[in-house]
Image: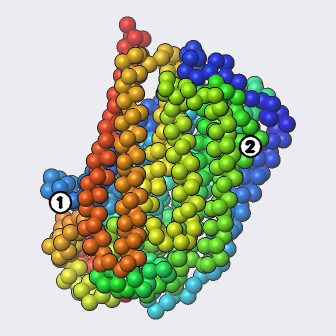
């Protein structure tokens, strides 16, 4: 069969754009592997299991894990600026996948284990079971229906977010 | 250039065209559209449940029996809603229409009809798998890439099969010219499997890359799945619908051909993030370059509509298409604005983004899909809508339009309010409380939008089953 000239040109054209996109936005950045920062955590099996629960329950749909460079001064969880230091590439070195997120229906969790209240294991556990009791006005659903061991593992993971 | 003269000349314009006789390649195309309507119903249902969750989670959690509390929760229904909406509903209408139109425009029989039938079952199987695995908590934890490995491989095979069928059908064509719609289908079906495989890291069962690159590649995938699959195919469909629905010649094929440059971008999702600065800057430039394909589409729409505006009152498919195009213009303007750093810093991660994605998938692509369905299904079935169903279809249009407009404006407003509150350092839970009433408005407008789709399903099911009754009689 003969391939019409237009089709050949356009197929090659789109293949060119696709290749350009893959090289520019996948291959080039992949050559740069940032070294782990002091915030990066090599997870224990329990923390890793907690991280899987974080994915399973879809926590990442409402909570981001990235502090953008524009909001480090003013971004608030309780007080202006307490969102914490700007995220750096090395913070994510051991994560697979990362949970940068796309929406923030709940607060950013990048440094949740560095705030006095949320750094407490007991607070996190109670909050997962009954968010409204600890944070009036929240729209976070309860996770009290999950097995206790799952919640404990999840809290272990949350406490790695320093 | 052969294509430039080769206008798609409508035999008789718009809805006045007499229905054509069904041919034997049509049932398969039709069943894709039927399946799409089914997944739309589940998508809407999940959407309303999610809206209630965002207003007040206990309302749902107190109703649900303990055994289902894990499955019916925001984080598990969110991928269910998104997947059935974009891969179930929009994609299946796209595939049905692409297969049907490829045969029509090339005057060829559908290649490998057995494979096409398998594709129908396999695609529905993948969607059924999504509908079951997400509530059970099986996920890869990446946006638009949540599907677990075996189902992801199945969907990749489906994309490859679709490309094979379309390319083979074109190779067997009797029509010497290749219309712009057909080659956009070819391009779209060729690029999508590549984007899907890279974005889902199909050679690794975990489906994820490591560290920051995982986010970068996920943004590449999310945006380019949108460009390569939904948008490029939609361009092909629009370039068919425009001359058909209006009865005018397509304004410019030469311009239309630039539609394939749906630009390779996506990193504007990473502005102000730890991603390299040069990548963020490149992404802003590429986002601005989307003016090329979008001018190709919108310019063609505007000039092809010349003299056809008065048809909007009577011509239902043209009205869906036109309103969809106006919303598409909004999408383009918003998309470029969101890729600018100043505006991005205000609205990124807020509910504005949710409004933007509903703008694209509901107000653009679902509106195009309804235009296609109201035009193609009567022709596939071989008779027009009855007067009563035509009246109900009118309600479908207006209720949907009011619902989606209220829905999107609510979300945009919420996004701006959130962005302002965050920038001012308002404590987070106070920003959530500020939105409480707006979440209720969003729920109400979502219910209106959902009610519009109930009317659609009524019209659709009545129309299709009436045909079966007539055939049996």
Tell me residue A86's x, y (percent).
47, 85
| Residue carrying label 1 | B58
Q: Nearer the viewer, mark 2 or mark 1?
A: 2
Q: Quadrant of the C terminus of chain A?
A: bottom left
Q: Which residue is mark 2?
A: B255
**Dot 2 and dot 1 within a common chain:** yes
Judged from the image, the secondary structure of the residue bearing numbered disc 1 is helix
Horizontally, residue B118 falls left or right of residue B448, namely right
Q: Secondary structure at mark 2?
A: helix
Query: Where B386 sits versus B211, above or below?
Result: above
Seen as rendered, the residue at the extreme top is B473
Q: Nearer the viewer, residue A157 or A89?
A: A89
Q: Against A120, is A25 above or below?
A: above
Q: Position of residue B118 (x, y in %)?
A: 52, 36
Query: Can residue B42 be seen at all in this image of the molecule?
Result: no
In primary-sequence order, the first of circles 2 and 1 is 1
Separation (CA) of disc 2 from disc 1? 53 Å
Measuring from the top left, give residue B333's x and y in whole percent.
57, 55
Quarter of the image with the N terminus of chain A in it = top right
**Residue depicted at x 40% and y 51%:** B408
């Amino acid at each position: 069969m003969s391939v019409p000239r237009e089709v050949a040109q356009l197929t090659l054209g789109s293949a060119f754009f696709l290749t350009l996109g893959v090289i520019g936005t996948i291959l080039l950045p992949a050559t740069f592997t940032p070294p782990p920062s002091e915030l990066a955590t090599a997870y224990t099996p329990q923390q890793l299991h907690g991280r899987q629960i974080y994915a399973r329950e879809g926590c990442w749909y409402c909570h981001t894990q990235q502090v953008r460079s524009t909001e480090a001064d003013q971004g608030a969880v309780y007080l202006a600026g307490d969102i914490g230091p700007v995220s750096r590439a090395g913070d994510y070195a051991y994560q697979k996948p990362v949970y940068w997120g796309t929406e923030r229906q709940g607060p950013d969790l990048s440094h949740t284990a560095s705030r006095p209240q949320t750094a407490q294991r007991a607070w996190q556990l109670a909050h997962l079971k009954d968010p409204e009791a600890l944070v009036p006005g929240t729209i976070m659903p309860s996770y009290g229906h999950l097995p206790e061991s799952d919640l404990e593992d999840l809290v272990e993971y949350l406490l790695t977010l320093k | 250039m052969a294509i430039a003269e080769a206008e798609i000349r409508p035999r008789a314009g718009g809805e006045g065209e007499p229905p054509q006789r069904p041919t034997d390649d049509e049932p398969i195309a039709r069943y894709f559209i039927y399946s799409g309507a089914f997944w739309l119903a589940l998508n809407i249902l999940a959407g309303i449940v999610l809206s209630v969750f965002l207003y007040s989670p206990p309302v749902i959690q107190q109703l649900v029996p303990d055994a289902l509390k894990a499955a019916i929760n925001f984080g598990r229904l969110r991928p269910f809603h998104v997947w059935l909406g974009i891969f179930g509903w929009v994609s299946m209408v796209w595939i049905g229409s692409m297969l049907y139109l490829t045969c029509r425009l090339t005057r060829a029989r559908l290649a490998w009809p057995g494979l096409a039938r398998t594709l129908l079952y396999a695609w529905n199987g993948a969607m059924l798998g999504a509908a079951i695995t997400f509530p059970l908590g099986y996920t890869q934890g990446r946006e638009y890439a949540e599907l677990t490995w075996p189902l992801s491989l199945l969907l990749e095979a489906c994309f490859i099969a679709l490309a094979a069928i379309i390319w083979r059908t074109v190779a067997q064509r009797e029509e010497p010219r290749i219309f712009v719609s057909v080659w956009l289908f070819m391009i779209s079906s060729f690029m999508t499997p590549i984007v899907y495989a890279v974005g889902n890291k199909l050679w690794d069962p975990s489906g994820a890359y490591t560290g920051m690159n995982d986010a970068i590649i996920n943004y590449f995938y999310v945006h380019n799945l949108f460009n390569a699959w939904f948008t490029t195919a939609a361009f092909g469909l629009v370039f068919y619908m425009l001359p058909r629905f209006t009865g005018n010649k397509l304004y410019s094929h030469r311009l239309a051909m630039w539609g394939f440059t749906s630009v390779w971008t996506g990193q504007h999702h990473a502005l102000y993030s730890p991603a390299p600065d040069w990548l963020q800057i490149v992404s802003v430039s590429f986002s601005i370059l989307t003016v090329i394909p979008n001018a190709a589409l919108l310019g063609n729409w505007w000039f092809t509509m010349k003299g056809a505006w008065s048809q909007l009152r009577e011509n239902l498919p043209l009205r869906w298409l036109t309103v969809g195009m106006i919303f598409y213009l909004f999408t383009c303007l918003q998309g470029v604005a969101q890729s600018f750093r100043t505006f991005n810093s205000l609205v990124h991660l807020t509910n504005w983004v949710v409004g933007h994605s509903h703008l694209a998938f509901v107000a653009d692509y679902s509106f195009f899909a309804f235009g296609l369905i109201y035009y193609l299904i009567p022709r596939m079935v071989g008779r027009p809508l009855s007067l009563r169903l035509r009246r109900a279809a009118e309600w479908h249009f207006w209720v949907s339009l009011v619902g989606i407009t209220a829905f999107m404006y609510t979300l945009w407003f919420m996004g701006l309010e959130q962005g302002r509150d965050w920038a001012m350092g308002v404590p987070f839970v106070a920003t959530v409380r500020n939105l409480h009433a707006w979440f209720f408005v969003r729920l109400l407008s979502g219910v209106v939008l959902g009610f519009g789709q109930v009317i659609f399903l009524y019209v659709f099911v009545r129309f299709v089953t009436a045909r079966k009754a007539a055939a049996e009689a």
